Amino acid sequence: MFALLAILDALGCLTLGLALYFGFGNSDGVHWHLMRCVGGQFMTAAFMFFSFRKSNLETLSAYYLLRILVCHLFPFISEYYVRSNRYPFTRERFLKYWWFIWLVISITQQIRVNWVVGHTTNVLTDLENVLYQLDSITSISIGAAWLAFPKWLLNRQVNVILDESHEFCARIMGAYFLTSHIISTRALNFKKDTDRVVAIDCRTILCITVLIAQIWSQYAYTDDWSGGHWVGISLFSTWTIISSLYRIHVMLQNRKAKCD
């Protein structure tokens, strides 16, 4: 049952992610940059869901908890956007039903696995333990900041007049960053090393796709983005380098273990 749900979820996320990342339309570069970041998050989620389809209970519990948190946040974001600004959102009712269905499915499946977290931490070194927890803290900090004051964060980086639609897109991006901390935190309790490697891969893929979107926007929409955008690019460059180096380290360690 879970494998089928995970595959369907992965296919949906991959389709939406590719559409957002490579799509074009009549809008400014700020909208498209934010949506490309969300597209990268969806593509990362697709990889994770597909990779976790046959995992242990504590890994499945992390997947369901991630879904539950997402399904709680998004209705609030869309409702705030519609009611605060009195803008028509023609697909609001459909999205509400969609998120409600996924919420029920996720809670039901989470109950089936008894909300298990895991009994021990299985990370090999103190440095790895620190890296996972720092990754979780960074995800929460960045996600919460974009949820709380998106216009303030964008104001010094862009040359366009911001409106509520920019805030809406930024809050969606922030919600996904915030919820991704669950995987970083729970990875400490994953029994299978392969599941922990998937968690590292997910962070690396996400950082790379967001970094590409940032550089893409900086050069493709020169009239819309200012030099202040390089601060965010520097942050994600650092995050990408750290996650990539850690992934390479794990790969070399696994190869060494196989040779021994």
Image (cartoon, rainbow, N blue to C red):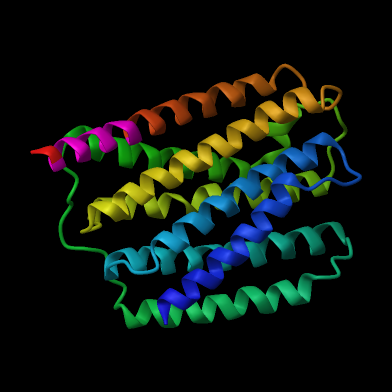
Left or right: 17 as drawn, with respect to 137: right
Task: Please identify the dominant SS of the magenta region.
Answer: helix
| Percent x, y of residue 199 | 37, 49
Can you tell which quarter of the image residue 13 is in?
bottom right
**Residue 157 seen:** no
Q: Is residue 72 above or below residue 183?
A: below
Residue 1 among those drawn in magenta: no
Q: Nearer the viewer, residue 236 or 69?
A: 236
Q: Residue at x 47, y 42 (%)?
A: 139
The total number of labels drawn is 0
Farthest residue toward the front?
259
Farthest residue toward the right?
26
**Residue 142 seen:** yes
Farthest residue toward the left?
260
Q: Nearer the viewer, residue 134 or 213?
A: 213
Left or right: 36 as drawn, with respect to 8: right
Residue 256 among those drawn in magenta: yes
In the rendered image, the quadrant that contains the C terminus is top left
| Percent x, y of residue 72 | 56, 67
Q: Residue at x 50, y 42 (%)?
A: 205
Q: Which residues are magenta?
A: 247-258
Q: Nearer the viewer, residue 41 or 230?
A: 41
Q: Residue at x 72, y 32 (%)?
A: 154
Q: Is residue 206 above or below residue 160?
A: below
| Percent x, y of residue 167 | 75, 46
Q: Residue at x 80, y 59 (%)?
A: 84
In the rendered image, the quadrant that contains the N terminus is bottom left
| Percent x, y of residue 49 | 46, 62
